[in-house]
Image (cartoon, grey):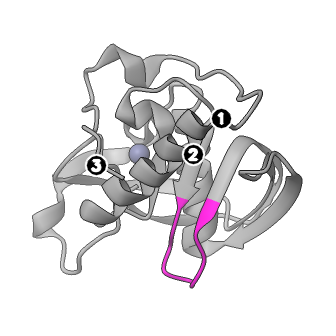
Amino acid sequence: MATRQVRIIGDEILRKASKPVKEVTPRIKDLIADMFETMYESNGVGLAAPQVGILKQIVVLDVDDGNQYVLINPQIMETDGSQTGYEGCLSVPGKSGIVTRPSWVKVRAYDEEMQPFELEGEELLARAICHECDHLHGGLYVDLVEGELVDTDSLEEDEDEE
Ligand code: ZN
């Protein structure tokens, strides 16, 4: 495993659409392991493959609920409710902004064995799923921010970055 360089806002790869994964090759397994390592090193709760320069529909998540999720070719099927709060992104270092997201989502995806599964998430997990799925379509949370971006350091508590 190795950490990979996180692409920063302004890098055009972050604005491109990622392609679906057809097969989980050893190379893709290595990528997933590296994505977890890169995410943990940066204290993130989620990371999408385009953030490390790979335009494939792969997301890793760990919102500290005891699970590590790998979502391959994720599709958000249903959403409910709303939550408004600060959000950050490893590709927008040092900044946070207020974003409204659903408070509950159901996502359909494939696991590392290319077996389909569904995952339901609420609160931070719902926010992280939406944020990471946006990355797969060239979206960044800054497109959705209400008001100005602020310095994350100026917030009272450490915010999670995705
Ligand atoms: Zn992000």
Please say if 146 is above or below 120. Answer: above
Residue span colored magenta: 61-69
Q: Quadrant of residue 123?
A: bottom right
Query: How many discs appear?
Result: 3
Which residue is at 58% across, 28% downward?
A: 56
Q: Residue 11 in the image: x percent, y percent?
A: 28, 20
Q: Is residue 12 left or right of residue 67?
A: left
Depth check, mark 3 against mark 1: the one in front is: 1
28 or 133, which lies in front? 28
Q: Which mark is residue 56?
A: none
Kindly indicate whether the residue at mark 1 contacts the one at mark 2 (C-beta within 8 angstroms): yes
Q: Residue extending furthest front?
A: 26
Kindly indicate whether the residue at mark 2 contacts the one at mark 3 (C-beta within 8 angstroms): no
Amino acid beneath label 3: Thr
Which residue is at 43% across, 58% downward?
A: 36
Q: Quadrant of residue 160?
A: bottom left
Q: Quickly name the residue at label 1.
A: 25
Amino acid beneath label 1: Thr
The crowd level at tag 3 (other Cα within 10 Å; few <14, some 14-19, many 20+) is some
Dot 1: what SS? loop
Please say if 124 is above or below 7. Answer: below
Amino acid beneath label 2: Lys
Q: Is residue 17 magenta?
A: no
Distance from Cα at disc 3 to Cα at disc 1: 19 Å
Q: Is residue 2 left or right of residue 133?
A: left
Q: Residue 162 in the image: x percent, y percent?
A: 40, 55
- Chain-order first, disc 3 or disc 1: 3
Q: Which mark is residue 29?
A: 2
Q: Quickly name the residue at label 3.
A: 3
Depth check, mark 3 against mark 2: the one in front is: 2
